[in-house]
Image: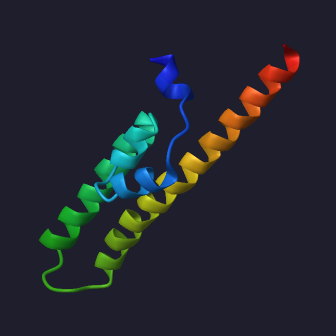
Amino acid sequence: MDDYLDQEKSPVVAALLAIVPGLGHAYLKDIFYCILYFIVFWVALIASIVYFKGFHYYQLVFILIWAYGIYDAYTDALELNKKSAETSSSESETE
């Protein structure tokens, strides 16, 4: 299990998986944000359908939440890879 957590994560794969809300963060093993994006996405979608018939500007909030989840999964993968590289380089220096 630890080997999987130490593996470099692909930002592109994380972004593509994040098209399904929360799945990109599940790939990154960030369960809190996985659940958060999943719940917020579906609450915003259901609210926009139930309370607003037709197109309203509130639906833009739903689209922005979805787009930000994709962006966040991509940038989180980049940050994890950077931290992983720093950790492995510092470990090799101490040996």
Give how far across and how far down residue 12 sits, in percent.
Answer: 46, 56
- The residue at 34%/52% (across/down) is 17
Q: How is the image coloured?
A: rainbow
The quarter of the picture where the C terminus appears is: top right
Q: Nearer the viewer, residue 59 or 6?
A: 6
Relative placement, left or right, of 30 versus 50 is right
Give how far across and how far down residue 89 sits, in percent.
Answer: 78, 30
Please say if 80 is above or below 57: above
Relative placement, left or right, of 19 versus 64 is left
Q: Nearer the viewer, residue 36 or 27?
A: 27
Relative placement, left or right, of 51 versus 19 is left
Q: Nearer the viewer, residue 70 or 82?
A: 82
Exactly how many numbered labels are in the figure?
0
- The residue at 70%/36% (across/down) is 85
- The residue at 40%/40% (across/down) is 27
Q: Quadrant of residue 6?
A: top right
Give how far across and how far down residue 87 sits, in percent.
Answer: 73, 28
- In the rendered image, the residue lying farthest to the top is 95
- The residue at 51%/27% (across/down) is 5
Q: Quadrant of residue 8?
A: top right
Please say if 37 is above or below 65: above
Give how far across and how far down residue 48 sits, in percent.
Answer: 22, 71
The quarter of the picture where the N terminus appears is: top left
Please say if 48 is above or below 83: below
